[in-house]
Amino acid sequence: MRNKNALIAAAAIIIICAIAGGLIMFRINHNSKERITGYESILLTESTMRGSSEFEIINKGETSEITLYGIYYNSGERERRPKEKTSCNTSAVIEILNECGVLSWNDFHGKHPKHVSDGTMFSFEAKVNGDAHIKADGSENFPKNYRIFREWLYESIRDTGE
């Protein structure tokens, strides 16, 4: 009787592990096929002790408009002032979004690390693939490849800024 119960328990564990493994593989394969094929708009806001800035990317068809704004406060009112602007090929934006795995950033919330008194806070919002929305935020804690994406934005502005 003990051997039979042990055999049944072992079989149940094997079945559960096989199902879990299959679900994990499905998720990995499923997510790896998901790609951004288009976007409407992207907004990346960063705030530090020195100030705040915002990148806005607007899809204009074949080209996209990237604008870097400075964020200023005047009598308690938030003002966005354009600092630099450039245009680039929309396919280049889609390529960097996919290279950085931006779809995986959705619902990311990077909590501020203990014992860190300052740092960079960010907020990211994008409307992609028709009606999908990506939202992420954090404080000195960023999603994978975030810095690569941010550096691409700064390089784009520096290389062709108006």
Image (cartoon, rainbow, N blue to C red):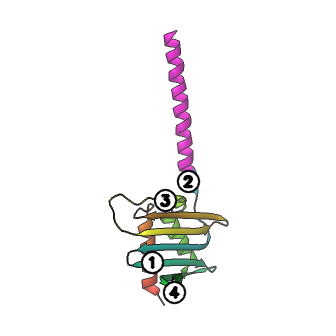
Q: Where 30 sits versus 43, above or below?
A: above
Q: Earlier in the sequence, mark 4 or mark 3?
A: 4
Q: Earlier in the sequence, mark 4 or mark 1?
A: 1
Distance Cα–Cα, label 4 vs label 1:
11 Å
Q: Earlier in the sequence, mark 2 or mark 3?
A: 2
From the image, state whether disc 2 or disc 3 is nearer to you.
3
Disc 4 residue type? Arg
**Labels 1 and 3 touching (C-beta < 8 A):** no
Residue 146 in picture, x, y percent from top left? 44, 66
Asked which secondary structure carries label 4, the reply is strand
Q: Which residue is mark 3?
A: 109
Residue 26 in picture, x, y percent from top left? 57, 45
Distance Cα–Cα, label 4 vs label 3:
27 Å
Confirm whether the magenta stretch covers residue 70. no
Asked which secondary structure carries label 3, the reply is strand
Numbered label attached to residue 52? 1
Q: Which residue is mark 4?
A: 81
**Residue 70 or 18: which is nearer the viewer?**
70
Disc 1 residue type? Ser
Q: Earlier in the sequence, mark 4 or mark 2?
A: 2
Range of the magenta residues?
1-29
Q: Which residue is mark 2?
A: 31
Q: Earlier in the sequence, mark 2 or mark 1?
A: 2
Numbered label attached to residue 149? none
Categorize mark 1 by other alpha carbons within 10 Å: few (<14), some (14-19), many (20+).
some
**Image quarter of residue 20:** top right
Q: Residue furthest left?
A: 115
